């Protein structure tokens, strides 16, 4: 019975043109639109090399530099960001005196200059994108330099580094300390191996939306089994085939249809649009599978619990999905933060929020704790939906047909 | 009429004690809010018979069938099929039942053969046997040339035949046919009726609901007439005709007649009712012999001019209209 119903459910779902469009074609079209939109954004945002100057103060050059390791780090970093032939070159830097720097700035040959000294200063003449970038980059480098200086000077680090006799031992100690710091604070991470683009997060939301689209397939599979929804359902209801088995096989077939859709979407993103998911592709895939299963269960529950026409059920699914996506921040991350801050329970029972939070966790955190928490929540939510559906469908007769 | 009803019911109940009952319904009651759709209904269906369920729209035919199939929740009563209580999970009973619903119930995305195979597969697991049954159903309904067609490519009559094939392919012992010939051409209707006779010859018991009286007359061994959820008459075709108190119906296609002559006909022996509609005069006799000859003699004597004159036995339609009334229903 399982194989029989599975085979035919697969057959009629795959021949349903409307369903195929929304499950297979629509996410791909949306992905293409994302690509066209974001590729332009990235193109627009590609930076030109910014001409700057670096001024070493006469006094500071001899005495101050020695007392200011942050200044040294700053100078070295700016030098490395200004290397010729480097594809990631940010600055076109030259060493000048302060008077020459002022002159170059007045002639608009540089966007600003960095005055090295005890307290490094950035001098710009006007406001602009390149000037802001220059200021922000120098500010960030200074902060990082001071942080690393503080860590190096801390008693813990001094203790950790004491008694080191070889470079290998020093490296080993340093790794241990870094690992300890990571465990204490998961926000400290090494992202050097990742190449996650700014737009990847938008593709995550697209995948999440495609996952939740499985609700329509789930609802459709259940509806065709219900006597109050269709004449086919009446015919199936009067047959000796157990409703539980039929629904189970129907749902399995629906899941396969959904997975095919996800496969097409991923293939299109990875091979067609060359979206780079970095090292996260396997967790992303697993979360997509779990999210699709959860969406399917939501569809089954709507099919079983909502006593209304098929069109009304589709309306309920679209409304719930869209509201869920909106609250989970698919249309702007601010909403997610607002809900998390003011009504955290809402995002705990919102499958869309669980999926997006899982993706955000993959993006922002190096550990998978929060990711697994979301996977667990999705599975728990799915189980609840299935139990409610089974309870509703078991031994069902109708008051009217 | 009440006396006749009771007499007919007594005969029916006595016969029921002798035959094997496939369906037994006792005091079935189903209400929709204030409306009693089925009101304390009791009847049975004997093995191998074709039972006709007749009634105007809203009389409770489909509701009764849906209650019998455990699709609808009912308020009161007991339903036994094959000697066992019918419940939503009575799978052993369901295995032996086939249902053809009023509306076509097939998958638009599957071909004719796939549709029949899918529904047959809900009853028959063995693939080889199912293949044989599907082929038999295709042949019985005359769909051999259309097995690869999709439902939207079929005409109304072919769709109805597909609907029937899906309901009976698994060779059920008990078949419910709910108005299977609605909106089909005469050729398809004949084909469907022939198919139902074949099913009965193979040993199936059939419960058949329809609005078409001639189908019931041709097909059914016994008839139950429902109105407002109650049985108002039951018996064989002949037994029901007896209930009307009509012995003979004579129709005259007139050229000319005077009112006093119509009144004189009303006064003839055994005449129960005379109705005149344009050029048609209908005379109903309650009893008597040679009524037709006596009427011919009267018309000759009165020099009444007419084109045609013919005599009929009462039809089931007469019975139906007499029992359920002539006012329009929803």
Image: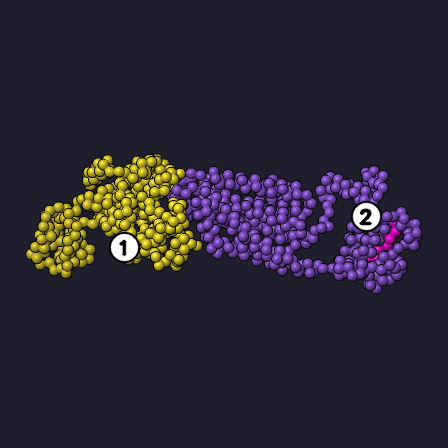
Chain colours: A purple, B yellow
Please report the residue visible at 13 percent of the width from the left and 53 percent of the height from the top.
B262
Please report the residue visible at 65 percent of the width from the left and 42 percent of the height from the top.
A370
Left or right: B65, with A259 as reference point: left
Which residue lies under the disc numbered 1? B190
Q: Chain of mark 2?
A: A
Left or right: B286, with A306 as reference point: left
Image vertical order of residue A139 relative to residue A152, above or below: below
Predominant secondary structure, magenta span: strand
The image quarter in which residue A376 lies: top right
Q: In x, y percent, where is residue A142?
A: 81, 49
Q: Is residue A329 visible?
A: no
Q: In x, y percent, where is residue B66?
A: 35, 43
Quadrant showing the N terminus of chain A: top left
Q: Which mark is residue A145?
A: 2
Asked whether the beta carbons under mark 1 and mark 2 sit within 8 Å of each other, the answer is no
Front-lying residue, B200 or B128: B128
Do marks 1 and 2 share a subunit? no
Q: In x, y percent, where is residue B199?
A: 29, 48
The image quarter in which residue B1 lies: top left
Quadrant showing the C terminus of chain A: top left
* Secondary structure found at label 1: helix
| Magenta range | A111-118
Q: Which mark is residue B92?
A: none
Please report the residue visible at 42 percent of the width from the left and 38 percent of the height from the top.
A395
Left or right: B101, with A289 as reference point: left
Judged by depth in the image, the label closer to the viewer, 1 or 2, is 1
Tell me if residue A114 is in the magenta stretch: yes
């Amino acid at each position: 019975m399982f194989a029989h119903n599975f085979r035919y459910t697969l057959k009629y779902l795959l021949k349903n043109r409307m369903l195929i469009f929304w499950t297979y074609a629509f996410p791909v079209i949306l992905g293409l639109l994302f690509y066209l939109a974001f590729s332009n954004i990235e193109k627009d945002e590609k930076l030109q090399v910014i001409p700057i100057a670096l001024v070493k103060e006469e006094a500071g050059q001899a005495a101050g530099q020695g007392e200011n390791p942050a200044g040294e780090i700053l100078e070295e970093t700016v030098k490395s960001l200004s290397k010729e032939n480097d594809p990631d070159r940010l600055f076109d830097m030259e060493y000048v005196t302060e008077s020459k720097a002022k002159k170059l700035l007045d002639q608009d040959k540089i966007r600003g200059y960095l005055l090295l000294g005890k307290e490094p200063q950035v001098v710009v003449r006007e406001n602009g994108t390149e000037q802001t970038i220059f200021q922000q980059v120098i500010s960030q480098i200074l902060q990082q330099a001071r942080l690393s200086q503080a860590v190096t000077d801390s008693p813990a680090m001094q203790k950790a580094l004491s008694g080191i006799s070889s470079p290998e031992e020093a490296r080993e100690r340093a790794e241990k300390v870094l690992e300890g710091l990571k465990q204490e604070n998961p926000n400290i991470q090494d992202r050097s191996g990742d190449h996650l683009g700014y737009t990847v997060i938008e593709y995550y939301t697209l995948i999440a939306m495609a996952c939740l689209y499985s609700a329509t397939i789930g609802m459709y599979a259940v509806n065709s089994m219900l006597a109050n929804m269709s004449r086919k359902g009446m015919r199936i209801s009067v047959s000796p085939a157990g409703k539980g088995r039929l629904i189970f096989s129907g749902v399995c077939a629906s899941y396969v249809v959904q997975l095919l859709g996800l496969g097409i979407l991923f293939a299109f993103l990875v091979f067609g649009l060359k979206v780079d998911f970095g090292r996260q592709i396997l967790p992303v895939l697993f979360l997509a599978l779990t999210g699709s299963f959860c969406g399917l269960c939501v569809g089954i529950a709507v099919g079983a619990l909502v006593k209304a026409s098929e069109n009304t059920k589709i309306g309920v699914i679209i409304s719930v999905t869209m509201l869920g996506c909106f609250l989970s921040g698919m249309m702007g991350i601010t909403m997610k933060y607002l809900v998390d801050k003011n009504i955290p329970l809402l995002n705990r029972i919102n499958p869309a929020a669980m999926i997006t939070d899982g993706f955000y966790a993959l993006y922002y955190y190096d550990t998978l704790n929060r990711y697994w928490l979301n996977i667990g929540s999705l599975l728990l939510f799915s189980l609840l939906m299935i139990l409610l559906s089974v309870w509703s469908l078991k031994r069902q007769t109708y008051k009217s047909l | 009429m009440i006396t006749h009803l009771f007499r007919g019911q007594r005969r029916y109940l006595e016969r029921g004690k002798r035959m094997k009952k496939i369906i037994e319904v006792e005091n079935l009651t189903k209400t929709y809010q204030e409306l009693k759709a089925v009101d304390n209904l009791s009847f049975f269906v004997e093995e191998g018979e074709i039972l006709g369920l007749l009634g105007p729209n809203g009389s409770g035919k489909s509701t009764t069938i849906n209650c019998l199939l455990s699709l609808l929740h009912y308020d009161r009563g007991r339903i036994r099929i094959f000697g066992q209580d019918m419940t939503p999970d009575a799978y052993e009973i369901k295995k032996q039942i086939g249902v053809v619903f009023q509306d076509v119930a097939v998958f638009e995305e599957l071909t004719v053969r796939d549709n029949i195979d899918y529904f047959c597969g809900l009853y028959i697991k063995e693939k080889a046997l199912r293949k044989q049954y599907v082929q038999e159903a295709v042949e019985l309904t005359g769909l051999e040339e259309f097995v690869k067609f999709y439902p939207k490519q079929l005409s109304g009559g072919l769709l109805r035949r597909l609907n029937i094939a899906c309901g009976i392919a698994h060779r059920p012992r008990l078949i419910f046919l709910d108005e299977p010939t609605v909106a089909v051409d005469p050729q398809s209707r004949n084909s469907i009726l022939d198919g139902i006779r074949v099913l009965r010859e193979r040993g199936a018991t059939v419960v058949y609901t329809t609005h078409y009286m001639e189908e019931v007359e041709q097909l059914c061994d016994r008839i139950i007439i429902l109105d407002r959820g109650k049985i108002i008459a039951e018996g064989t075709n002949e037994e029901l005709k007896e209930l009307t108190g009509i012995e003979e119906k004579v129709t005259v296609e007139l050229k000319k007649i005077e009112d006093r002559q119509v009144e004189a006909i009303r006064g003839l022996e055994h005449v129960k009712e005379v109705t005149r509609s344009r050029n048609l005069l209908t005379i109903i006799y309650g009893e008597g012999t040679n009524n037709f000859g006596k009427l011919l003699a009267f018309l000759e004597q009165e020099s009444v001019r007419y084109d045609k004159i013919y005599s009929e036995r009462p039809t089931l339609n007469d019975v139906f209209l007499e029992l359920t009334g002539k006012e329009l229903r929803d």
